[in-house]
Amino acid sequence: MLKVAQAQLHSMVLNQRELLVRDIEEHLAEYRPDIVLIHPRPYLLQLINDSIDLASRFRIDDVFSMRLFVRLRWDIAPGFYRQPQIARVLSWGERTAEDRFKELATERYAQAWEDAQKFNAPHEWST
């Protein structure tokens, strides 16, 4: 029963942009408090919104994967999704976002993640 309630909550969050932005902001505050402390809130919210737009292009359709996509922009590089192998897996629309991220976490993509760090120029923050 708890899973149903959580699924319903996540569905509501995904369908209301303001709730989704707030959820991701809270997630970043918990896991990467430096991000929240360094960036002025209006700028942080702009980056979160931009990240949600990017993730939506890859049909990221669950809250956990959306949080992960946004956090990877800070943890790896803002343009990590441009690395060809990573972009290919993220584009697998027939698989769930969770499955795509599980695939990307396998050893065969270790070099791709290393290469993705090169997409760290300031212009990578704007789409």
Image (spheres, grey):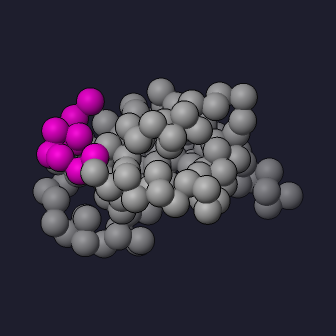
Left or right, residue 11 beside residue 81 = right
Across and down, in percent, residue 98 comes to 66, 48
Left or right, residue 18 beside residue 65 = left
- Which image quarter holds the N terminus? bottom right
Q: Which portion, as a residue range, is magenta?
A: 119-127
Q: Nearer the viewer, residue 113 or 66?
A: 113
Q: Residue at x 16, y 59 (%)?
A: 39
Q: Nearer the viewer, residue 15 or 34?
A: 34
Q: Residue at x 66, y 51 (%)?
A: 103
**Tally of numbered discs:** 0
* Residue 11 appears in the figure: yes
Residue occupying the far right of the picture = 1
Across and down, in percent, residue 121 comes to 17, 46
- Which image quarter holds the C terminus? top left
Left or right, residue 111 beside residue 61 = left
Q: Residue at x 32, y 55 (%)?
A: 117
* Residue 98 appears in the figure: no
Q: Is residue 93 above or below residue 19?
A: above
State the image quarter where residue 38 is shown: bottom left
Across and down, in percent, residue 31 comes to 41, 71
Across and down, in percent, residue 118 comes to 28, 51
Left or right, residue 75 beside residue 2 = left
Q: Nearer the viewer, residue 62 or 8?
A: 62
State the image quarter where residue 25 is shown: bottom left
Q: Residue at x 39, y 31 (%)?
A: 53
